[in-house]
Amino acid sequence: MKPLGTGDPLRLGPYRLLGVLGEGGMGKVYVGQDAEGTVAAVKVLRPELTDEANLARRFVREAQAATAVTSKGVARVLGTDTEGGRPWIATEFLAGPTLDEAVEAYGPFEEPALRALAASIARTLADIHATGLIHRDLKPPNIVLTSAGPRVIDFGIARPEHGLTLTSTGQVPVTPGYGAPEQVLGRRVAPSADVFSLGAVLVYAASGHRAYDASHIAALQYKVVHDEPDLTGVPEALRHLIAPCLAKDPAARPTPSQIAAAFAPPRGAERAWRRGPVNQAIKERESGIHELTAATLPDGGSGRPVPRRRLLTGLAAGGVVLAQDIREIRHNPVPSHAHQNLLR
């Protein structure tokens, strides 16, 4: 996280802004804190884009979609303002690594933890779909591991069920390798598209590599539509559970409820992110944000103050609804690390 720079607002709505969590071509995300001490990730549309009707509408849709989903498996919306000169969305700040960060740092998940991950995300997808929405961009950087379990973030391209995938410019706003074949082809999609994405996420979490990969986007998208997934490294006991999620035919994929039941994690598996190196990473981030925000409150504690810049630099903030820019998806080559997809 970086300190505020020239041109960054000091306050948005009730939130005093403390630092920049990330930025992309469409906007910025700040860490903010209100008068009661509540910490939030505050996503803001870039001021020069507020007059672009399509982007402004997309931002409003994101706010509406995120607010509609009240599942405990998503980042809770704390407030929005889409009418002012600087539209913003505030969500709860999630202190924890994203799934791609955890896999890159500590390796693939063992079977009990993977079962717990699959069941938890499947239940969250069921909650999202129950509102009539499809997430459409489930991927490792959009899953945060917290002490309370995995959370799904970023409803930037969420749409109602059976909505078209194509944007107004005819582009396909999906992350290469995680979007379902029907999304890649620009067809109407159903909740089963999120199931395909979940299958691709689970392959990555179980093996450390993508289910579909190639040196450039066109070849990668061709594989998604025509080729079988690479399940190398996925435990044999889980292959028959993950493979159906990646069926080319949307009707052949299981439902989120069926997935949650099939993975049936062993007792205590849900505590996988409360111990070991992932738990340590979560605690370090929780501690970092606590020190940063406590230092800004009137009764922020006693003892030697920690320099704010050092806190900002040391705080690796996971679980943020980060600014999206679909133009980078279609122009940039496929990144070698999943976390580079965080800011599109």
Image (spheres, rainbow, N blue to C red):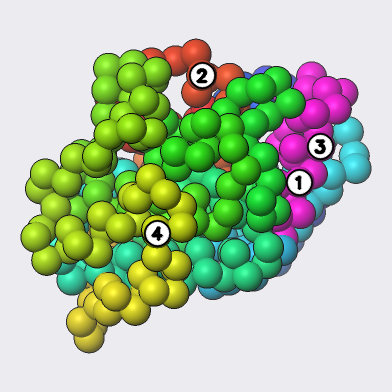
Instruction: Tell which of 108 and 264 is nearer to you.
Output: 264
Q: Are marks 2 and 1 in contact (CB under 8 Å)?
A: no
State the extent of the magenta-drawn residues as a range: 43-67
State which quadrant residue 294 falls in: bottom right
> In whole angstroms, how far apart are the C-alphas of marks 3 and 1?
6 Å
Q: Residue at x 69, y 46 (%)?
A: 163
Q: Residue 43 location, x and y as percent?
A: 66, 41
Predominant SS of the magenta segment = helix
Question: Helix, strand or loop at disc 2?
Answer: helix
Q: Which mark is residue 253?
A: 4
Q: Residue at x 35, y 50 (%)?
A: 247
> In whole angstroms, how far apart are the C-alphas of marks 2 and 1?
22 Å
Q: Are marks 3 and 1 in contact (CB under 8 Å)?
A: yes
Which dot, 2 or 3, sits closer to the camera?
2
Mark 4 Cα-neighbour bin, 10 Å: few <14, some 14–19, many ≥20: many
Q: Residue 103 location, x and y as percent?
A: 23, 47
Q: Residue 25 location, x and y as percent?
A: 62, 22
Residue 34 relative to residue 220: left or right: right
Task: Say which amino acid is labelled 2.
Answer: Arg
Task: Say which amino acid is labelled 3.
Answer: Arg
Q: Are marks 1 and 4 in contact (CB under 8 Å)?
A: no
Does 270 appear above or below 223? below
Q: Which residue is mark 2?
A: 330
Task: Say which amino acid is labelled 1.
Answer: Arg
Tell me if residue 156 can be seen: no
> In whole angstroms, how far apart are the C-alphas of marks 3 and 4?
32 Å
Which dot, 1 or 4, sits closer to the camera?
4
Q: Which residue is mark 1?
A: 61
Residue 202 relative to residue 299: left or right: left
Q: Residue 85 location, x and y as percent?
A: 88, 33
On whether residue 53 falls in the magenta region, the answer is: yes
Task: Say which amino acid is labelled 4.
Answer: Arg
